[in-house]
């Protein structure tokens, strides 16, 4: 049984300029005291073609964590534009929030992002090289994809089934979450078949473009 549950995420400062920091207000419940730190990461997917362009925007450690409800704002600087392929600078991509305990990732929340020019003329006639200072970043806050992984929270062997890599998969999936076979970095092109639905980040990125017109900034994940 998972000892930490994310209950709410609010996307702050959205939509925003491309160069503004990412800000997420996270609320999570801890059902019993954790003696070691939780490791939170924010990852920007730079290209749908390869994980090579994924960027870890920030990593923070929270702990020890007492039992109860906790809220914090996770803020990170925007990605390094020199590491983003020019052909992938404008359009739809993904940002991920992950949390691990004892080096084991147990939850991942992913959002589509739409990067587009604020100026209508530039949208219709984009410059040959991306002008990042003219881009607006719009996170699709109402369509997250939450994935949980069963991990060993204690020193004793965990119960439950495992996949071929020995990783334990949580089969008590709630709140629109999905099972995934393994904990590799979530990019648009590296998901096993059978884990997708209409809101899943396992979809090809272009399938999410029309959904990026949502304006709400709140994600309620309480069951």
Image (spheres, rainbow, N blue to C red):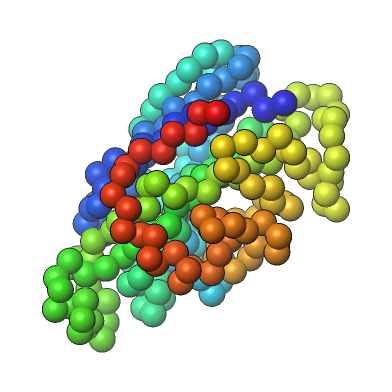
Q: Nearer the viewer, residue 211 or 70?
A: 211
Q: Is residue 112 left or right of residue 180?
A: left
**Up/down of 212 relative to 99, above or below:** below
Residue name at image x 65 percent, y 62 percent: 191
Q: Quadrant of the C terminus?
A: top right
Measured from the top left, where is residue 122 in percent x and y?
17, 78
Q: Is residue 154 left or right of residue 214?
A: right
Q: Nearer the viewer, residue 154 or 119?
A: 119
Residue name at image x 57 percent, y 43 percent: 176
**Up/down of 180 relative to 37, above or below:** below
**Up/down of 88 relative to 7, above or below:** below
Q: Residue 25: in sight, yes or no?
A: yes
Q: Quadrant of the N terminus?
A: top right
Residue name at image x 53 percent, y 22 percent: 29
Measured from the top left, where is residue 90 in percent x and y?
33, 72
**Up/down of 37 relative to 94, above or below:** above
Q: Residue 78: in sight, yes or no?
A: no
Measured from the top left, where is residue 165 in percent x and y?
82, 51
């Amino acid at each position: 049984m998972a000892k930490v549950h994310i209950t709410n995420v609010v996307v702050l400062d959205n939509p925003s300029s491309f160069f503004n920091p990412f800000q997420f207000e996270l609320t999570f419940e801890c059902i019993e005291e954790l003696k070691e730190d939780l490791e939170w990461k924010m990852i920007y997917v730079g290209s749908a073609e390869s994980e090579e362009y994924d960027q870890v925007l920030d990593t923070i450690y929270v702990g020890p964590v007492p039992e109860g409800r906790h809220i914090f704002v996770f803020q990170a600087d925007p990605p390094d534009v020199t590491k983003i392929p020019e052909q992938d600078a404008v359009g739809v991509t993904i940002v991920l929030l992950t949390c691990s305990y004892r080096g084991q990732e147990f939850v991942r929340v992913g959002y589509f992002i739409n990067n587009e020019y604020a100026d209508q003329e530039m949208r219709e006639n984009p410059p040959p090289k991306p002008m990042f200072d003219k881009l607006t970043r719009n996170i699709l806050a109402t369509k997250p994809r939450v994935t949980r992984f069963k991990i060993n929270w204690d020193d004793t062997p965990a119960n439950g089934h495992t996949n071929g890599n020995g990783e334990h998969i949580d089969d008590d999936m709630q709140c629109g979450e999905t099972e995934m076979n393994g904990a590799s970095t979530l990019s648009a092109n590296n998901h096993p078949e059978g884990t997708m639905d209409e809101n899943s980040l396992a979809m090809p990125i272009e399938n999410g473009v029309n959904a990026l017109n949502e304006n709400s900034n709140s994600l309620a994940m309480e069951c």
